[in-house]
Image (cartoon, rainbow, N blue to C red):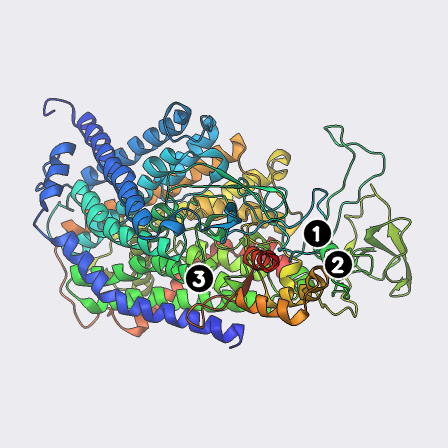
Amino acid sequence: MSPTFAGILFIGSLVVALVLTHRPVGDYMYRVYTSARHLAFERVIYRLIGVRADTEQRWSVYARSVLAFSAVSILFLYAFQRLQDKLFLSLGFDAVPSHIAWNTAVSFVTNTNWQAYSGESTMGHLVQMAGLAVQNFVSAAVGMSVAVALVRGFARKRTENLGNFWVDLVRGTVRILLPIAFIGAIVLVAGGLIQNLSGVHDVATLAGGTQHITGGPVASQEVIKELGNNGGGFYNANSAHPFENANSWTNWFEIFLILVLPFALPRTFGRMVGDKRQGYAIAAVMGILAFTSVAVLTGLEIAHNGTVPQAVGAAMEGKEVRFGVANSGTFAAATTLTSTGAVNSFHDSFTALGGMLTMFNMMLGEVAPGGVGAGLYGMLVLAVITVFVAGLMVGRTPEYLGKKIGAREIKLASMYFLTTPVLVLIGTALAMGSAEQRASMLNSGPHGLSEVLYAFTSASNNNGSAFAGITVNTPWYDTALGLCMAFGRFLPIVFVIALAGSLAKQAPVPASAGTLPTHRPQFVGMVVGVTIILVALTFLPALALGPLAEGIS
Amino acid sequence: MERLPSWIRQHLAALRALLVLTVVTGIIYPLVATGVAQALFNGNANGSIVQKDGKDVGSSLVGQLFTDKDGNPVKKYFQSRPSAAGDGYDMESTAAGNLGPEDIVDTLAVPGAKDSEGNPDTGKQSLLTQVCARSKAVGELEGVSGARPYCTADGVGAVLKVFPAVGTPTRAVSVNQACPATPFIAEYQGVKVECGKPGEDYAAGRTVAIRGSGKAVVPADAVTASGSGLDPHISVAYADLQAGRVAKERGLTSDRVKALIRENTTGRSLGFMGEPGVNVLQLNLALDRLKG
C-alpha cells in the first residue's frame, strides 16, 4: 500500500468514527445538560461547594461565576508551581520562576496550554497531575458550560435565566470528561503509554552510555489533554514523545479524542434548540472546513515543497518514523483546527505552506470544529454574523433560530470577532518592533516572522502549539503571551454570555416567508464563506510577509 | 455565608469548587488510573523496559545512541536517526531541531574569534547543511554515495548569494563553503563563483539554491532529526542500508541480518495507520543475543 493511500484511509477512518459517535455522544451531552436530576455524589459536591444547585443564574451572574472560578484557578495554579519544591513528588525540581509560573497558570486555565517550560525538567509529578491536569478537565468543562449557556439563550424565551454555572461545570467534568478520560487512559496504557509515579531511572545503554528514563502519570494526563483540547504535554516533545504517543494506533486514537467532543456538540445544540437540522448545518460547516484543511495540509506535507524537504526527499524533519509524513500532517491539522495545540511533529519544520495552514486554521478562530465548547460558541457567533450579512443584502432585520439579531446582538458578536485579531496583530507588531524580542527567533527571514506570528496567533486563540524554535521563556514573552491568552479567552466569553442573556430575554419571532432558512446547504455555504472571508481580510497581509513569502519565493 | 457580600461568596464558592474538583480529577482519578494500569499492563505502565543479561538497558519505545565516547558510530550496531534531544536521545531534554524548510544559509565560523562566553566561534549550520553533512557521513560509513540534491560534494548546502539582488548578476558567492574551499560550481550565469569569507555579511544578496544532479541513496529518516529526539525507529530502507556493514562487523551473513530486520519491523497498525519502522534497540539486542 502506498503511503498516500494509507494516509487517505487514515483520514477516512477518522471521518467514519466521528460520524458514528456524533449522535450517541451528542445525545448523551444533551441529557447531561438538560436533566433536572442530580446524581447522589454531585449533591455531595454541591454541598461541599456551598451552592444551591436548583437555582438559576442571569447572564451577569453566570459570567461572574466563570470569571471568579478562572481567577481563583490562576492564583491557585501559580501558587502551586511557586511552592512545588516544598511539596512531595517534586522530583527535586526547584520552584518554578515567577514569569513562567504566571504564563503557565494563565495558559492552562485558559485552555491554551502554551508551554514556555520543558515538562521533564521543570514540573514535578504533583504539579502535573493535581495542578496542570486538573485545569485540563475544568477549563474544558468551562468552555462547554459557556457554549451550553449560549445555546440556552437561543432555546429559551422571555427569561433572564441561563442555567447554573456550577452545575454545568460539575456535570461536564464528572459526567462527560471523567468517564471518557478514565477509559481512554487505560486504552493508551495498553498501547504503551506509561502510568506510574516513579522518578528518573538510569540505565546503561548497549553502547555503554547512560540514559535517564523518565516516569510519571502520563497516560491519565495525555487522554484529557487531547479530549479537553488542552494540548499541554507532559514532556517537552509533547505527543511526539514515545511515552505520550507510543505507536501509530495510539496516534489515531489521540486524534479521535481531539475531535470527538467538538464534533458531537452541534448535535447537542440541535437537540437543545429543538431542531436537529440546525445542528447538522453547524456540523456541516465545521466538517467542510475541517476536511478541506486536513486533506490540503496532509497533501502539502506529502508533496514536500521547499529546498530542505526537496534535499531530504520527504518532509521528515521533526517527524517520527512510526507516524510518517501523512499522519503527522493529519494530526497537525486536527490540533490547530481545535484549540488543542498538542503536536506529534514539529510545525516549525513543516513545509512553508503546510506551516501556514496550521496558522490559518487557528486564525479561523478555531471554529472548525474548534475547542471543546469554544468551537460551538464561536461557530454560533459566526452564524449570527452570517444572518446579519444576509439581512443587509435583502434589507430585512436578521433573525437566527427565531431570535432577532438587533444592534446589541451584532455589537457583541462583532466585538467577539475583533478581540483575537487585535491581540494577534498588535502583539506581533510590538514583538517585531523591538530588537530584543526579535532575538528570540531561531530562524531568520520570513520564517522568523512566522515564528512570532504563530506564537501570538496560538496564544490569542488559546491553541497552545508553537513554531517551537522561538525562545519564549523570557519575562517579556511570558507576560505578553500570558495577557493575550487571558484576554483572548475571557473577553469573548463575556461577550458570548452577554449575547446569550440578551437572546434569552426575547420572545421568538415566528418564521415567515422572508426568514432565511438556516438549516439548508445554502446557509452552510454562506457561513463557510463568511468565515474564510473574515480571516482572509484580517490576516492575509501578515501571512503574505511570513509563510506565503517563504512558500512561493 | 449568606451575610457576606455576594462577590466574596462567589469567590469562596469558586475556591471550594476548585479544591473539590482537584481532589476528584487531580488525585483520585490519576491514582485509580495508575492502580488499574499497573495491574492490567504492568510492563507498559512502567516504560516497556527491556533487559540484557538481567540488566535494564533501555525502553523498547525509546531510541538511544549507539556511538562511542567520542560520538563515533559503533560499527557493530545499527545506528538511530539524528536527534536534537540534548546531546542525542536525552530523555531529560526532549526536543526537535525546529529549523524551517528554507533554513539554508550557514553562519561560517570565524577562525580565532570568540563568542560572548569566550569559547571559540563555531558558526551556525543551517538545516540544509546539517542534512548534507549527515548524508555525507552516512554515505561514508556505509560505503555508498552520500550525495543529495542541493548538497555540495563536501557536504554543505549548495547555496549561492547573488549580487545585486535584482537584475543581472555581477557577483556570486558560495556562502556555505568557507575559503579556501573550491566552490561547487565555477560559474553562475557567466559570473565566477567565489568561496565564502567567514564574518562577511552577504545578507543583501539574493539566495539561490542549486539543485544539482545529485541523487540521494541515503534515506530521508537518516538525515533528519525526529520530533521527539527519541525516535525508536528507522525506516526499513535505512536498516537495509546498514545491514551490510553490521553483517561484516559481526561476521554474519547479510541474509541473517536482513531476517532479523524483518523480525524487528513494526508494520502499519491495521494495515493503514502510520508507516513501517525498524526498532533499532530491539534489533541491536537481537544481534547481541545471537552470540550468547
Residue indicated by mark 2: B141
Q: Farthest residue toward the front?
A: B292
Of helix, strand and loop, which one carries label 3?
Answer: helix
Do badges 1 and 3 share one subunit?
Answer: no
Q: Image quarter for residue A113?
A: top left
- Spot occupied by residue B290 in the image (x, y as percentages of width and height): 59, 60
- For the question of whether residue A525 can be seen, the reply is no
Dot 2 or dot 1, earlier in sequence: 1
Amino acid type, callout 2: Leu
The quadrant the C terminus of chain A occupies is bottom right
Please rate how many residues cluster around mark 2, counting C-alpha atoms within 10 Å: few if below 14, some from 14 to 19, many from 20. Answer: some
Instruction: Give A131 or A391, whichever is nearer the viewer.
Output: A131
Instruction: Give B124 or A128, whichever is nearer the viewer.
Output: A128
Residue that appears at 21% across and 46% down: A174
Indicate left or right for A436 with B15 as reference: right
Q: Nearer the viewer, mark 3 or mark 2?
A: 2
**Distance CA(mark 3)–CA(mark 2):** 54 Å
Instruction: Give the number of callouts.
Output: 3
Residue indicated by mark 3: A533
Chain of the residue displaying label 3: A
Of helix, strand and loop, which one carries label 1?
Answer: loop
Chain of the residue displaying label 1: B
- Spot occupied by residue A32 in the image (x, y as percentages of width and height): 16, 53
**Distance CA(mark 2)–CA(mark 1):** 9 Å
Please rate how many residues cluster around mark 1, counting C-alpha atoms within 10 Å: few if below 14, some from 14 to 19, many from 20. Answer: some
Q: Is residue A221 above or below residue B207?
A: above
Residue that appears at 24% across and 35% down: B23
Chain of the residue displaying label 2: B
Q: Nearer the viewer, mark 1 or mark 3?
A: 1
Do badges 3 and 2 share one subunit?
Answer: no
- For the question of whether residue B64 can be seen, the reply is yes
Residue indicated by mark 1: B73
